[in-house]
Image: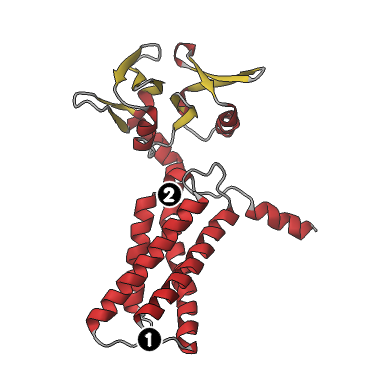
């Protein structure tokens, strides 16, 4: 029972890869290119190859089907929007993608080469599907893990003080370029956003209004780790949090600058508390 309990805790543990590290378009293109490269270097030898042109076209079709399998599983499992992406979900994403790729490739192979289906072909496709699938997964995971580790190192956090952030609105003249450490929070105001930031002193808070919605801004700024959507109307810089306060059913955070109070959604309060308690971020 203890072993089963440990296994359950492991597979349901939160995966190291945050959703913002999962760049959907980049991953899909990478899977397509890696699949095509592997199929060209290690072709399916049980297929009847008449000339070089059908060989290349067939491999492009197979690579496209593998990428489509990944897209379908991304839509179903939603690794981008999932609040808790666990190791079991990660395994399911890989296995489902490989399995669906096998089904689609088998169907297309039967249509292209109706007389070529044999025991040898089935065995070769099965072996290469799993070998290629896990090779591609390990390759992509390595670079994802590398980005994750580099984003967590103290050296990188220290350098974040000098990083600049550019925020743009829908109008051409709406641009703001400031150090990331100076950004306090962004507030949604209908079809506009109000950006609050520091000039030099911690109490010298300025604001500027841009024509843009907060969801679009959040997507544009996903690469900035210290920015977090704590409420449907607020995007905050975690580095400026002084403390979190809960009273009855309402939770809000207090920022260091002029003790600004920001509302927090109930399901976001726990995450913010963990960030402060673990001292994960470089607080200013």
Quadrant containing the C terminus is top left
Secondary structure found at label 2: loop
Instruction: State the CA–CA distance, disc 1 to disc 2.
Output: 34 Å
Mark 1 is surrounded, within 10 Å at the Cα level, by few (under 14), some (14 to 19) or many (20 or more) other residues, namely few
| Residue at screen point 45% across, 24% down | 234
- What number of labels is visible? 2
Relative placement, left or right, of 15 versus 237 is right
- Residue linked to disc 2: 22
Quarter holding residue 248: top right
Residue at horizontal 47%, vertical 26%? 232
User: Which residue extends farthest right?
Assistant: 1
Residue appearing at x 45%, y 11% in the figure: 258
Q: How is the image coloured?
A: secondary structure
Q: Position of residue 112 (x, y in %)?
A: 34, 80
Where does the image place residue 237, in percent across and percent down from the top left?
43, 27
Residue 271 lies, with reference to residue 19, above or below; the image says above
Q: Position of residue 256 (x, y in %)?
A: 48, 17
> Percent x, y for residue 167?
29, 29
Pointer 1 or 2: first along the chain: 2
Q: Which residue is depicted at the point 63% across and 55% down?
A: 11
Q: Which residue is mark 1?
A: 45
């Amino acid at each position: 029972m203890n072993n089963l309990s440990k296994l359950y805790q492991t597979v349901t543990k939160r995966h190291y890869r945050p959703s913002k590290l999962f760049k959907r378009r980049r991953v899909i293109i990478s899977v397509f290119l890696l699949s095509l490269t592997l199929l060209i270097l290690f072709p399916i030898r049980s297929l009847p190859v008449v000339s070089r042109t059908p060989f290349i076209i067939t491999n492009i079709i197979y690579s496209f089907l593998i990428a489509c399998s990944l897209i379908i599983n991304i839509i179903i499992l939603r690794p981008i929007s999932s609040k808790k992406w666990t190791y079991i979900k990660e395994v399911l994403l890989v296995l489902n993608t490989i399995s669906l790729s096998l089904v689609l490739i088998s169907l297309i192979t039967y249509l292209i080469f109706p007389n070529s289906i044999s025991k040898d072909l089935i065995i070769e496709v099965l072996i290469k599907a799993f070998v290629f699938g896990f090779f591609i997964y390990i390759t992509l995971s390595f670079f994802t893990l590398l980005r994750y580790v580099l984003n967590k190192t103290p050296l990188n956090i220290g350098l974040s003080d000098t990083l600049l952030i550019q925020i743009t609105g829908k109008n051409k003249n709406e641009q703001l370029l400031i150090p990331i450490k100076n950004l306090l929070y962004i507030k949604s105001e209908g079809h506009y956003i109000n950006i609050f930031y520091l000039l030099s002193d911690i109490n010298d808070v300025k604001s500027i209004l841009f024509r843009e919605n907060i969801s679009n801004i959040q997507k544009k700024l996903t690469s900035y780790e210290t920015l977090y959507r704590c409420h449907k109307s607020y995007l905050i810089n975690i580095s400026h949090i002084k403390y979190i306060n809960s009273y009855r059913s309402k939770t809000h955070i207090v920022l260091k600058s002029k003790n600004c109070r920001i509302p927090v959604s109930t399901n976001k309060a726990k995450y913010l508390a963990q960030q402060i308690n673990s001292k994960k971020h470089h607080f200013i």
